[in-house]
Amino acid sequence: MNYPWQQTQWQKVQLQQQADKLPHALLLVGAEGLGKLDFALQLAHSLLCQNQSADGSACGVCSSCKLLEVDTHPDMFTVQAENKGKAIKVDDIRQLSASFTLTSQFGGYKVVVIVDAHDMNINASNSLLKTLEEPVSDSILLLVSSNPQKLPITVRSRCQLIHFTIPEPQQAIKWLEEQGIGQPSELLSLAHGAPLLAMQLKESELLENHRLLIQSLLSVAKGQPLVELAEQLHKLPLNYMLNWLYDWVQDLIKLHQCGSQVDLVHDTHRSELAKLVDRSSIQSLYEYQDQLIKQKQLQSIPLNTQLLWEDLLLSWHKQLKRV
Ligand SMILES: [Zn+2]
């Protein structure tokens, strides 16, 4: 079954399929943690299943479904970078295009799923473009991307876009509770409303990392020395940590501008944030936010993250003094 927040998208592709109007390339876009890849795989399975259910889902028992279950269906192809964050190379796409031109072994669709399609390097994108320009009958390409701006416009414009958006909080909270997660509001807030990311936070050490960051920021605010704190923080996943620090500063800006009733990412720290607002000027918060944006925009991780954290904590401390 698809996630409850994907029903509209699912119905849309089902109607297209029933009308025999499914485009040969779909680009599934939206934030991380919304289950876009799961959607693509379910659609792929549904297209290859020999005995689809009334709602379009795969039956799970036919010979096609059995092969899909063990990843050996000859008409199903998946392409992804060797490691997360690495490039999808031209050879991967060439190989795919070659397999794609062969006749379907089951006499139905041939389906390709490209995971994190934005990871394709320029040669890979150009190679894919040829496949997109000369579609093979009964073949479907499903591109999945949380960063579609990185894809060349020539690729994007040849795909039909399916957007996935953050679900209503009540729907996400209900779903997380059904997965056995108690009091999911804080997790959901830290995951910017993406339910699967909230699950991931719960199941990993990330939540503990987040606690450490907040404790460090509060300690620095109390005047504690920051070098030891930076030493702890620099070992943690920088991407998440910077995003949360950004959210923390954003919360302070929101409190400054909109007053105490505003929605906050760090809702459980509302009273601490309220005290910190009194010690920060809006100008200094914006300056600190700019520093974080610049840091976030850097594509590579700095060589010395210890120094980076010393710098970030020092700036945090300085901006608190300037009232
Ligand atoms: Zn089946």
Image (spheres, grey):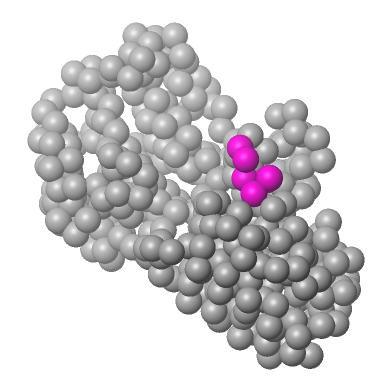
Q: Position of residue 321 (x, y in %)?
A: 76, 85
Give yes or no for residue 208 being in the magenta stretch: yes
The residue that appears at 61% across and 85% down in the rendered structure is 287
Q: Is residue 54 above or below residue 61?
A: below
Q: Check the picture and name the quadrant holding the N terminus.
A: top right
Which of 164/182 is in front? 182
Q: Is residue 320 above or below residue 188?
A: below
Q: Is residue 281 above or below residue 71?
A: below
* Magenta span main SS: helix
The residue that appears at 50% across and 19% down in the rendered structure is 53
Region rendered in magenta: 204-209
Whether residue 107 appears in this view of the structure is: no
The residue that appears at 72% across and 52% down in the rendered structure is 211
Q: Position of residue 71 (x, y in %)?
A: 33, 19
Which of 195/164 is in front? 195
Q: Position of residue 74 (x, y in %)?
A: 23, 20
Whether residue 266 appears in this view of the structure is: yes
Q: Check the picture and name the quadrant holding the C terminus.
A: bottom right
Which of 203/77 is in front? 203
Drawn side of residue 180 relative to residue 73, left or right: right
Q: How many marks?
A: 0
Q: Position of residue 129 (x, y in %)?
A: 18, 54
